[in-house]
Image (tube, rainbow, N blue to C red):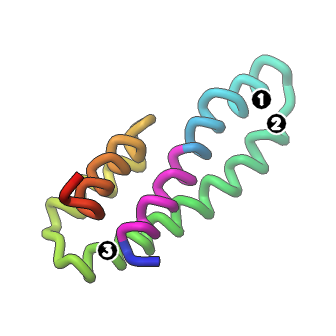
Amino acid sequence: MNPIQTLRLTGLLEGLSYLFLLGIAMPLKYLAHQPLAVQIGGWFHGLFFVLFCFALLRAKLSYKWSFFQSGLAFSAAWIPFGTFVLDRKLKQIETPGD
């Protein structure tokens, strides 16, 4: 897989796990008193976040992105739905003719 494909995949996994935590696991924890969803989901989210950071570093080095460009991509991981917006931008880089 090239760096953009890897970044897109890890970004989607990170974004989905973030939405799972916010939309499913946290309500289960606080409304249904079921903290297990946060424990398991949080572990996977942390793993996907670390993988996203490594994929971002690989893409930054491969495509010689500036600090600002890579900082924008990194900030997408902190905003709900941010990685999905990033995915759309990365798709444009991956297939510039479309």
Residue at position x 74%, y 41% in the image? 38
Front-lying residue, 73 or 7: 7
Q: Which percent across, then down, holds residue 95?
A: 27, 61
Position of 95 compared to 37: left or right?
Answer: left
Identify the mark at residue 35; answer none if there is no mark: 2
Question: What secondary structure predominates along the stretch shown in magenta?
Answer: helix
Quarter of the image for residue 26 reads top right
| The residue stretch that appears in magenta | 4-15
Q: Amino acid at mark 2?
A: Pro
Magenta run includes residue 14 = yes
Front-lying residue, 88 or 52: 88
CA separation, marks 1 and 3? 36 Å
Q: Residues within 10 Å of mark 1 (few under 14, many from 20)?
A: some
CA separation, marks 1 and 2? 4 Å
Q: Amino acid at mark 3?
A: Ala
Q: Which percent across, then down, holds residue 50?
A: 52, 67
Q: Earlier in the sequence, mark 2 or mark 3?
A: 2
Q: Which residue is mark 3?
A: 59
Residue at position x 19%, y 57% in the image? 97
Q: Earlier in the sequence, mark 1 or mark 2?
A: 1
